[in-house]
Amino acid sequence: MPLVFPFDPDITRAATIPARLYNDPVYLELERERIFAGTWQLVGRREQLAQPGDFITAEVGNDSIAVVRDGDVLRGFHNVCLHRAGPVAHGCGRRQTLQCRYHGWTYSLSGALLRAPEMEGVEGFRPEEMRLRPVAVDAWGPLVFANLDGKASPLAEVLEDIPARVAPFHCESMRYVMRKEYDLACNWKVYVDNYLEGYHVPVVHPGLHRELDYDNYRVEPHRYYSLQHAPMRPVPAAQAAGDRRYVPAAGDVPEAFYVWIFPNVMLNVYMGQMQTNVVLPVAPDRTKVVFEWYATDPPADPAADARWSRLVAFSDEIQDEDIAICEAVQRNLRSRVYDRGRYSAKRENGVHHFHSLLHEFLT
Ligand code: FES
Ligand SMILES: [Fe+2]
């Protein structure tokens, strides 16, 4: 079976990517190598790294990494001791050095090997030349990203004009509120495909559809990200206080800002709050999705805050609807009769854009 697959850059002629990309474990390995190791992955929050010595750990695919604050700079390392591969950091916290939990080799926050006990007499062993293997790290707003192979375009280039476009929302001053995790029985790309189009909104999300100006829903692809314009229906004043669950307040920026950054990060930005979604492949047919919420004025107790609970309940309703259809699609992608479909040129340009990036990175 060929690893390469045909792909037409013209959406009006293109067929969707073959079903085997959603089923065959060989593609997940290839994606880990060529996509997840080669792009910026969201690994943590800047507030976790506010003080010198603060560190976090994260899993990126099969690799464990640590990100530390060394003075003013953020540094990333593979969380793998040079001796016999013990972990040099656990969880998160604050430390002056990183000490391996196996035989106690100690590294500085810049990754240099400081101490390797009882290694006298070992030929050619020069601790002063040994360093933890680095990982590229960078941050934007409250978010910290890492790139395993160090070859991704600079984060600022990948984000392009996103920071300028979301400037009115002041994401950089938002603070962390809460997190939710979802386990899905589908390939990670099924979830991303689904996020990237509004085509399914009328059928899958009737509640959301009532609030959206569907005719004016559109997707704007950029080099490594795409932006969804999902304007809300204008609210008649008499109805504003009634049954609408999201009512833009006067003076609000009218549009929410939905952005997807290749391959697996979504930022949903609203006035006063923001949500990140990270889509993590677990197996060809298993995916973990992590939602994290941030707010300009975080509620003291999100569970006890009526406005916040309403917002999370609405998000849950949509997420449940998306999970059900994604899992049903994954089951059918194993069907003996299905291989490839066609795109709606009007509604699925975001999915076609994602697939063109997959094609670029995988072949
Ligand atoms: S594996 Fe780290 S000190 Fe031995
Ligand atoms: Fe959806």
Image (cartoon, grey):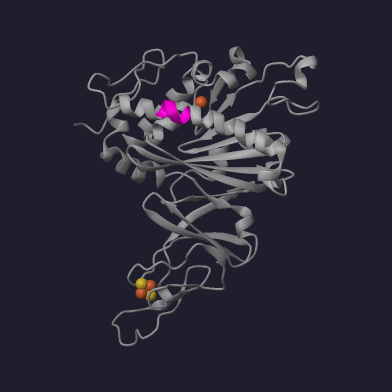
Left or right: 81 with respect to 233?
A: left
Q: Where in the figure is residue 333, as x and y percent of width and height? A: 31, 26
Q: Is residue 325 magenta?
A: yes
- Write the residue at 61% across / 53% down: 46
- Write the residue at 30% across / 32% down: 21
Residue in the foreground of this view, choosing between 130 and 296? 296
Q: Which residues are magenta?
A: 322-326
- Write the residue at 43% across / 66% down: 132
Location of the C terminus by quadrant is top left
Query: Within the image, what quadrant is residue 209 found in?
Result: top right
Q: Where in the figure is residue 288, as x and y percent of width and height? A: 44, 42
What is the magenta segment's predominant secondary structure? helix
Location of the N terminus by quadrant is top left
Residue at the outermost left position: 1
Q: Is residue 19 above or below residue 262?
A: above
Q: Is residue 195 visible?
A: no
Q: Is residue 158 above or below residue 103?
A: above
Q: Is residue 138 visible?
A: yes
Q: Is residue 25 magenta?
A: no
> Number of callouts in the render?
0
Q: Where in the figure is residue 7, as x and y percent of width and height? A: 33, 23
Q: Is residue 315 above or below residue 87?
A: above
Q: Is residue 323 above or below residue 54?
A: above
Left or right: 62 with respect to 213?
A: left
